Image (spheres, rainbow, N blue to C red):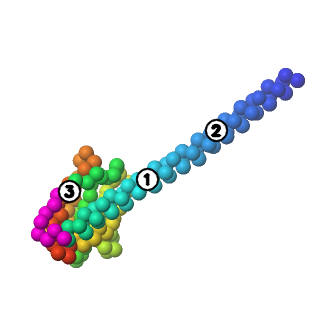
Amino acid sequence: MRRGIAQSYIFLIVLGAVITLLLLYFGWGAIQDMNERARQNQLIQFSVDIKYSVDAAFSRLGSVKYQTYSVPDGVSHICFANIYMKDELYGRQELDPLVRNGIEVDHNMFLFGQGFTYGYNIGPLIVPDPYYRCFEIQNGKLVIGLEGAGNSAVLR
């Protein structure tokens, strides 16, 4: 009789361990998925904040306003492109192929991080010659100046 009870306990312990491992495995996947969604939401909110600043610059014709933005975690650098000068940009070998493809669909801001590149259209933004400008992110902050130009904003 004791041998049967011991085997039952061993079976229950093994079954409990298997169930625990399955819960940890699928739970970890769910946590990773939630973290990825949170990062994507932060990136979208950041692009909306920049777009709002570009739109607000229109009314400040000729004046430059410098603004500091908190950049989402994981972003190493941010680049802006002048989509009104596509032909000049296409010939540049130094452009990342993802940026070149993004310009084709009118993306003018690109966020780069470890393992990802996202492109967004943040409204009518003029980037002076060479029509493409990148900023390294330091301490999670980006400082850019936007000058009102009537129907667009000029990156300074």
> What is the C-alpha distance between the residues marked 3 and 2?
50 Å
Instruction: Please name which of the two marks, 2 or 1, marks the residue nearer to the observer.
Output: 1
Q: Position of residue 23 (x, y in %)?
A: 62, 43
Give the residue number, with chain letter if any, for mark 2.
Answer: 20
Residue that lies at the very extreme toward the right in this rendered image: 1
N-terminal of the pair, mark 3 or mark 2, is: 2
The label on residue 145 is none
Residue 10 visible: yes
Q: Quadrant of residue 21?
A: top right
Q: Mark 2, residues whose alpha carbon is within 10 Å: few (<14), some, or many (≥20)?
A: few
Badge number at residue 38: 1
On screen, residue 24 above or below 106: above
Q: Quadrant of the N terminus?
A: top right
Depth check, mark 3 against mark 2: the one in front is 3
Residue at screen point 49% across, 48% down: 32
Tag 2 and tag 1, C-beta contact below 8 Å = no
Q: Amino acid at mark 3?
A: Gln
Residue displayed at 54% across by 48% down = 29
Quarter of the figure with residue 121: bottom left
**Magenta residues, start to end:** 59-67
Q: Who's the residue at 17% across and 58% down the image?
A: 66
Residue corresponding to mark 3: 67
Q: Nearer the viewer, residue 16 or 154?
A: 154
On the picture, is 17 further left or further right than 113? right
**Image quarter of residue 48:** bottom left
Q: Is residue 61 magenta?
A: yes
Which residue is farthest top? 2
Within the magenta stretch, is there residue 123? no
